[in-house]
Amino acid sequence: MSIFIGRKKEIQFLEDEFAQDRASLVILYGRRRIGKTTLIKQFIQEKNAFYFVATEESERENRRNFQHAVSDFTHNTLLKKDVLLEWDEIFSVLNEHQPEKKKIIAIDEFQYLGKARTSFPSIFQRIWDQMLAGSRSMVILCGSLVGMMVEQALSYSSPLYGRRTGQIRLDQISYQDYGLFFKHPERINLIEYYAVTGGVPRYIELFTPATDIFQAIERNILSRQSFLFEEPVFLLEKEFGETGTYFSLVKTIAAGNRKLGRISSALGMNQSGLTKYLKTLQELDLIVREVPITEKNPEKSKKGQYRITDNFISFWFRFVHPYRSYLEIENTEVVIKKIKDQFRSSHVSFVYEDICRQWLMQKGLVKSPHIQLIQAGRWWDKDVEIDLLGVTENREHAVFCECKYTAAPVDADVYRQLMEKAKNVFLPDGSEKHYVFFSQSGFTEAMMNLARSQENVHLASIS
């Protein structure tokens, strides 16, 4: 059973659209397992709502199923007869049912209708223009294949372009809401769970009964019977029809090849030939191209590096895919040992930086609440790296952060090291510097005394 957690902004947006005394057309899209269907079902509870999920069957079978669903909703038994109507005719019955009442028409997996019949977006455009746009209906078109949804419903070339009254791209659950999935979050290490499942609700639900992260990994990922065992392959096949180059690209980035030149060399492909594949993966929110946040022209920066944004995908390519030969013969003991040896240092510590970034952007500086950050991200130049650098709009304030996922408390020497690194960042004259230290294991007495004595030193324990 799906758990509904978070999504307050999305629910509020849908409620606001529903409250309008006009027709609404909302496009809801995002990657698989992200909770789109759960969001729709939560929203339509106790409302006059028609819900239909399209399938990968033929257009004719989808139309027949849609006709029968409309028959059940409108109590029109004539639609159950063998005569198959056209889309316009079926929607006409749906539209004319209780026209005085506000109703919701939600079509899930909308992209399959366009996949089965390429002209369907044009057909639906005509239905919207001639029928639904003048009604009091709220239409939600929902889809999982991001590339196909953009093409069919959002892009300039789509027949539906300009018709939507709003859109929601559903992202992963933030770490701030992550603990709400667990009955006893205090009994587990939430950071390590988040490092494996990310904010994908379906993945999180699988892990909720477990108390030990490595037992949970063995049961829910390393087992050949778990759907997560092949999940990245499934996701890429569904989105692209073939894994090929996309699979190799993600694998190469997961192996630590983050610059375009290194990716190109590892794959034996020209950099120009990789661009379109990398752009598509970015559009699907599987990878991101990062530059130091002080770069004035990010798109043209030569310092760009690619990073996998999905914690589970990153984990899988690092700890599952390289050891498939062991897992195929169910020798999980060897793989679990490798995971235990490297999990925290080579995976969790990097996820912790992203958790700290989320925290910084959500909460700001407790000692200086007037400072409003507009951006925070990694900064690097040659052999100098700063975990997080946050800036205000005119960069009159800069926040330098160190994120420590270690067993030992953070000591004051880390402050001096960060101050030295900060000297390498060019900032406007008069810019005020602040230093934030995140720790999973707390701080030494010396570090806490330092923070008490200096207004621009901030400590935050995230665990």
Image: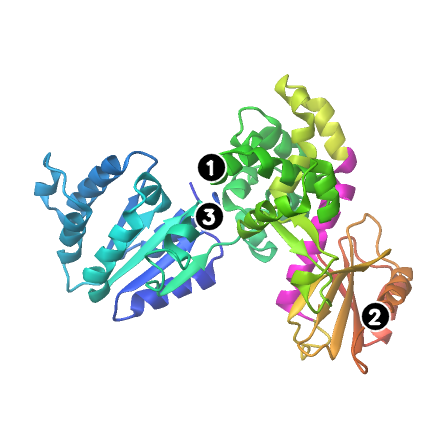
Location of residue 320 (image quadrant): top right
- Which residue is at the front of the view, 239 or 418? 239
- According to the picture, the residue beneath numbered tag 1 turns out to be 238
* Callout 2 amino acid: Ala
> Magenta part of the protein: which range?
341-364
Query: In the rendered view, does 394 fall on the left or right side of 423?
Result: left
- According to the picture, the residue beneath numbered tag 2 turns out to be 451
* Callout 3 amino acid: Gly
Kindly identify the residue that appears in the image at 66 percent across and 68 percent down. 375
Q: Quadrant of the N terminus?
A: top left
Picture layout, residue 338 above or below residue 451? above
Q: Secondary structure at mark 2?
A: helix
N-terminal of the pair, mark 3 or mark 2, is: 3
N-terminal of the pair, mark 3 or mark 1, is: 3
In the rendered image, residue 4, in percent from the top left (x then y), is placed at 45, 51
Query: In the rendered view, does 15 fall on the left or right side of 396?
Result: left
- According to the picture, the residue beneath numbered tag 3 turns out to be 147
Magenta-colored stretch includes residue 109: no
Nearer the camera: disc 3 or disc 2: 3
Kindly identify the residue that appears in the image at 25 percent across and 71 percent down. 21
Location of residue 434 (image quadrant): bottom right
- The dominant secondary structure in magenta is helix
Q: Secondary structure at mark 3?
A: helix
Callout 1: 10 Å neighbours few (<14), some, many (20+)?
some
In the rendered image, residue 346, in percent from the top left (x then y), is placed at 76, 42
Kindly identify the residue that appears in the image at 58 percent across and 45 percent down. 277
- Which residue is at the front of the view, 451 or 287? 287
